[in-house]
Amino acid sequence: MQKKWFLMLLTIVMVISMVFVPFRTALVFYDGNTEKQKAYLILDSGDYFGITFTHSIHLTDVVEKYKITDDKKIMQYEMIYEEFGIGMPNDAMGDEEFEYIDGKYHIKNMTNEFDYLNIRNGEKVSNHRLSWGNSDERADVHTVPFNDYFVPGDWYKLEVKEISLFEQLKGVNIHE
């Protein structure tokens, strides 16, 4: 009889562990005001993603490229844009490289690391896109508009973390 109870208790503990113990790495989007999880994208350390937005004044695309580091940080490694002006850098710093390629400015070799990013989904010019892939050259294999998942004008906190099956059920899985 004790063995039966022990096995039942062990089964319950295993099921609870499978549901609540974090086991998947994801880029998680939280509502910036409430910290409530809104969506997630399953990515691993070493994977790449990008955020493209239309600059509200120049009305040209700005691409920010990121990599997930082994210690679950977000590292910006490149920025691409077409116009100088408000909010846009005019040169590279330190070991960064500044290049003009096919009508666009590239700042490469960036090593800006962040624990999280705060992103506002454009309201007046609402054309943000999220792209991802598993290598630098393939960082835009998959692309989805922010407006498919997020409210224009709202802001979000993006963070890389391990999530559980329960946390996956709380948010929307971003997919192509």
Image: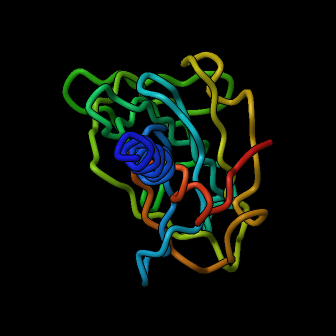
Q: Of residues 48 and 55, which is closer to you in this image?
A: 48
Q: Is residue 89 visible to the viewer in this orientation of the structure? A: no
Return the residue found at the far left.
Answer: 94
Q: Of residues 89 and 115, which is closer to you in this image?
A: 115
Q: Residue at x 40, y 50 (%)?
A: 5
Looking at the picture, how far across and down is residue 133, in whole percent? 63, 26
Return the residue found at the far front.
Answer: 1
Looking at the picture, how far across and down is residue 91, in whole percent? 34, 36
Return the residue found at the far bottom.
Answer: 33
Q: Is residue 102 left or right of residue 96?
A: right
Looking at the picture, how far across and down is residue 36, in whole percent? 47, 75
Q: Is residue 154 left or right of residue 117?
A: right
Q: Residue at x 63, y 55 (%)?
A: 53
Q: Residue at x 63, y 61 (%)?
A: 58
Position of 34 relative to 59 (above/below) = below
Looking at the picture, how far across and down is residue 57, in whole percent? 61, 68
In which quadrant will I find the C terminus?
top right
Q: Residue at x 31, y 32 (%)?
A: 92
Q: Of residues 9 and 78, which is closer to you in this image?
A: 9
Q: Which of the 4 image quarters holds residue 132? A: top right
Q: Is residue 149 visible to the viewer in this orientation of the structure? A: yes
